[in-house]
Amino acid sequence: MSGLPPVPGTEHQTITIESNDDVVRARQLVRGLAQRCKLSLVDQTKLVTAASELARNTLVYGGGGVMRLGLVQRDGRTGVTAVFEDSGPGIPDIDQAMTDGWTSGGGLGLGLSGARRLVDDFTLETEVGSGTQIAVTKWAR
Amino acid sequence: MTERVPVLKIGDVLLVSIQVDLEDQIVLDLQEDLASRIVESGARGVVIDITAVEIVDSFVGRMLATTAAISRMLDAETVVVGMRPAVAITLVELGLSLGGVRTALTLEKGLNLLARPGNDRPAQR
Amino acid sequence: MAEQDISARLVELLTARGELLASAWVEAVSRTLRGRISLAELDRELHDLYTALVAGIREGGSDWQGEAYAEVRALLSELSRGRARQGFTPTETATSVLACKDILAPTADTPAEDIHAYLQLSKLVDSLALFTLEVYAKTREEIISAQAEQLMELSTPVVKLWDGVVAVPLVGTLDSARTQVVMEKLLQALVDINADQAIIDITGVPAVDTEVAQHLLKTVVAARLMGAECIISGIRPQIAQTIVALGIQFGDIVTKASLADALKHALRNSSTDLSINGGQA
């Protein structure tokens, strides 16, 4: 599965997501980087919330995985990108999974669709039986 | 050995002030603790203070809504106080409007709201 | 003739009668600017530039993007920014640079090698003029975006109407970005002055589109989440029609015809709080 290319010259971190504590850690790392990238408070909050939803998805539905986090650059703007990867069952029907209120695991069904609304860029790659990768980016205004 | 959020009792109101970055298990424990403390203490109201909370995602949002619904069934009113603007904007964007949860700007206003049950505004959607 | 030789000849030409040529340049430019810059200032500006340009050609030939031209580019940027701020047109700004060509303009009895030198200067000056224009355009963009920001600040005041009541009177066209700024400012004001009644007055707003209407709705819902009630006042008939036609549900949001009605409603809503807090204050 093709990963988001790390931007040359910017640092990036990878953490494993295997427990609830890791979800908290993922949030803290994302917030730290969002602050350094000078996202507005509202944008920071949106990105951290999206990361929280996706990290939980990785844990609950993907059976654990990793988050890769880094700064990205495009057209002179800086952004924070977080990529969540698992090798879980994958998502059979993406359209359905992206619908508000649809859930396969007893949640509110706002995780994916909500996370997409909270960020500027959202890409999802999934293959049934081999895993899911979701990348989200928030750009500094 | 997960930590637990303390539930304080003031008169007939239970007060929870969340000061830590919420891990999912703590959230579930809190929901359980509150339900049993309402029954034990016969509390009439619950105030959940989230002034210090930097993000509320759908998991925590669901806990707030569920707690409100459970406590109502146990004859106690729940008020969530101190939500930050950025958190509120994010929740709306996320698609959560916390139906059935009453809210107040500050702890003081939240307690006032519970103190005057006959006088308050109609319950919010 | 090799390029170095042409450059050397060019430097020779430019230095031999340096003072005269620079003055001719100043003279030509001052005519186009018609006294809107003092002659002394222009004289200093162009003489500095002339000196730097000759040095640049001597060191770096015609490679105007190279290290040797750093000084030239810095001076041009400064000139260009100044012109943009003072409101000169792009033509006037570019002409200041382009006029530099004419001082070596060949005549009937110009020897062939000097014509080569002139052509090189001409190409060089063209590039530098384009560079100047780019800086000019960039500066204008900066000015525009700074003004837009100022306008945004000016046009979204959040005012305290009463104890516990804030209002934001919106005037002019609302776009998505501005509505978002208003939303954030209003919600922050609720916290800052401990107000649980907010009024968004859109009397001065000529029209709304779907996105703006959605933002207004979201603001109301977000205010509720924080424990405040939000009233929208001053909805014009056309806007009401738009909102209905767009199929946007305003649901149970309180709307009032005028700001006065909205304030009355807000005070009635918060009156219990006022009487209680009033005793303590």
Image (cartoon, rainbow, N blue to C red):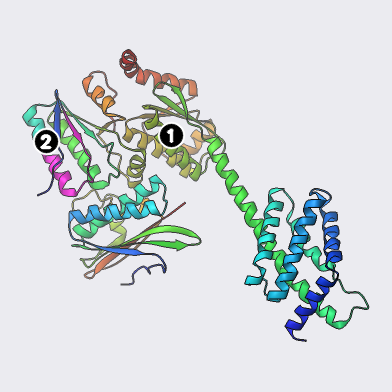
Q: Nearer the viewer, mark 1 or mark 2?
A: 1
Q: Is residue C147 above or below residue C240?
A: below
Q: Which residue is mark 2?
A: B35
Q: Seen in the image, is C59 located left or right of residue B89?
A: right
Query: What is the magenta range?
Result: B14-34
In the rendered image, the residue lying farthest to the top is C279
Q: Chain of mark 2?
A: B
Depth check, front residue: B117 or C207: B117
Rendered-image quadrant of the N terminus of chain C:
bottom right
Q: Which residue is mark 1?
A: C186
Q: Chain of mark 1?
A: C
Which image quadrant is residue C119 in? bottom right
C-alpha gap between disc 1 and disc 2: 35 Å
Q: Amino acid at mark 1?
A: Leu
Indicate yes or no whether the magenta region holds residue B17.
yes
Where disc 1 sits, the SS reads helix
**For residue A98, side relative to residue A10 (left or right):** left
**Which kind of residue does numbered mark 2 sit on?**
Ala
Position in image of residue A141 (x %, y %): 47, 51
The residue under the point 65% across, 61% down is C74
In percent of the image, x 9 and y 26: which residue is there?
Answer: B42
Q: Residue at x 62, y 56 (%)?
A: C138
* Element on which disc 2 rests: helix
Quarter of the rendering containing residue A59: bottom left
Residue located at (37% from left, 60% from top): A81
- Residue C191 at least partly seen: yes
Q: Are marks 1 and 2 on the same chain?
A: no
- Could you tell me which quadrant the C terminus of chain C lies in? top left
Residue C139 in the image: above or below residue B96 = below
Q: Is residue C254 above or below residue C102?
A: above
